[in-house]
Amino acid sequence: MSLARVSRVLAPGGATSSSSSSSSPAPPPGPPPHHPATVDTFQQVFDTWLADQDRHLQELVSAAERCSDQPELLRGLLGRVMGQYEQYYRAKSLSAQQDVLAMLSPPWRSTLEDAFLWIGGWRPSMAFHVIYSKSGLQLETHLLQLQGIPANDNDDLADLSGEQLRLIDHLQLRTIREERHITEEMARVQESAADASMVELSHLATQMIMRRTTPCLRVNQRVDATLVAKENQMEELLHAADDLRLRTLRAIVHDILTPIQAVHFLIAVAELHLRLHDWGKRRDAVATSHPSI
């Protein structure tokens, strides 16, 4: 299933919409739990995204080896790869509207990936570490070659100009400021788990449990309204985080790097994402088959 098709399925009114048009009266809707349809459908999105990223990685590597002196051809490939990123984030945005908690704690990722998550995905500032790591590795290669030591020469990010470095530094500072602001806003939402309304409601619910009484509709409605408000705040921050991720990629690929440099950058990004996912799944499989005592 393509990402575009999955996006249509996730869209309001699509295949995952609930059939709540019954004529019988119903209680006021509360905060939806994890929607199995949403989670399962976005699992397809993620699996499709991994397959597409692996395919694009092969195309990028081939282009870097054979078409490094054909910038127009490279721009076409870069446009297709970035278009796939944009489709992925559109589908993710639609899923977040239905189940933001699943997007923040995605069950389709490994525990290793979970440990590195920032608001449902990768930190935008990591993109700059990829650039600096790749350029540093390439510089080491050049130094080895100057010493007459054989080394692979990929001609990737070691030749960044002074102007490019200035633009990268400016973008990095701006990205870190936005990243920090989103982090602080998410911290405020998380801290609100202990605000006055939550403490009061948890006390009321505990009293009812101890008295073996069923929570009244009014209490349930208050709980639902309180949790929905917090989930809405989380959804806004997830959208802001994904927007920053995509804007950072676009600026690096389209505004700063040359086509061949952008190809090498996206190769490194895809390699890191795919291999981290593979390593995490492998470690999870080992942990499942050999649980600690």
Image (cartoon, rainbow, N blue to C red):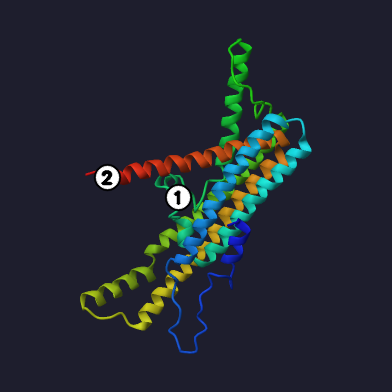
Is 214 located above or below residue 232 in the figure? Answer: below
Left or right? Give the position of 162 relative to 179: right
Residue drawn 69% across the image and 34% down it: 63
To which residue does mark 2 refer? 291
Q: Secondary structure at mark 1?
A: loop
* Residue occupying image coordinates x 40% and y 79%: 221
Identify the image quadrant of the N terminus. bottom right
Determine crowd level at label 1: few under 14, some 14-19, many 20+ residues with C-alpha closer than 10 A: some
Residue in the foreground of this view, choosing between 181 and 18: 18
- x 69%, y 47%: residue: 80
- The residue lying furthest to the front in this view is 1
Quick one: 32 or 164, which is closer to the camera? Answer: 32
Q: Dot 2 lies on which element?
A: loop
Q: CA distance from mark 1 to mark 2?
A: 19 Å
Tell me the residue that label 1 is attached to. 109
Nearest the eye: 204 or 114: 114
Reply above or below: 100 against 244.
Answer: below
Residue 55 lies, in percent from the top left, at 60, 43
Res 167 quadrant in image = top right
Q: Residues within 10 Å of mark 2 (few under 14, many from 20)?
A: few
Q: Is residue 27 left or right of residue 93?
A: left
Where does residue 127 sit, x and y in percent of width and height?
A: 58, 40
Q: Residue type at mark 2?
A: Pro
| For marks 1 and 2 on the same chain, the one whose residue lies earlier in the sequence | 1
Outermost residue, bottom side: 24
Confirm whether residue 63 shows in the render.
yes
Residue 5 image point, x, y percent: 61, 61
Residue 100 in view in this figure:
no
Residue 129 position, x and y percent, is 56, 36
Q: Quadrant of the C terminus?
A: top left
Three-letter code for the amino acid on which mark 1 is drawn: Arg
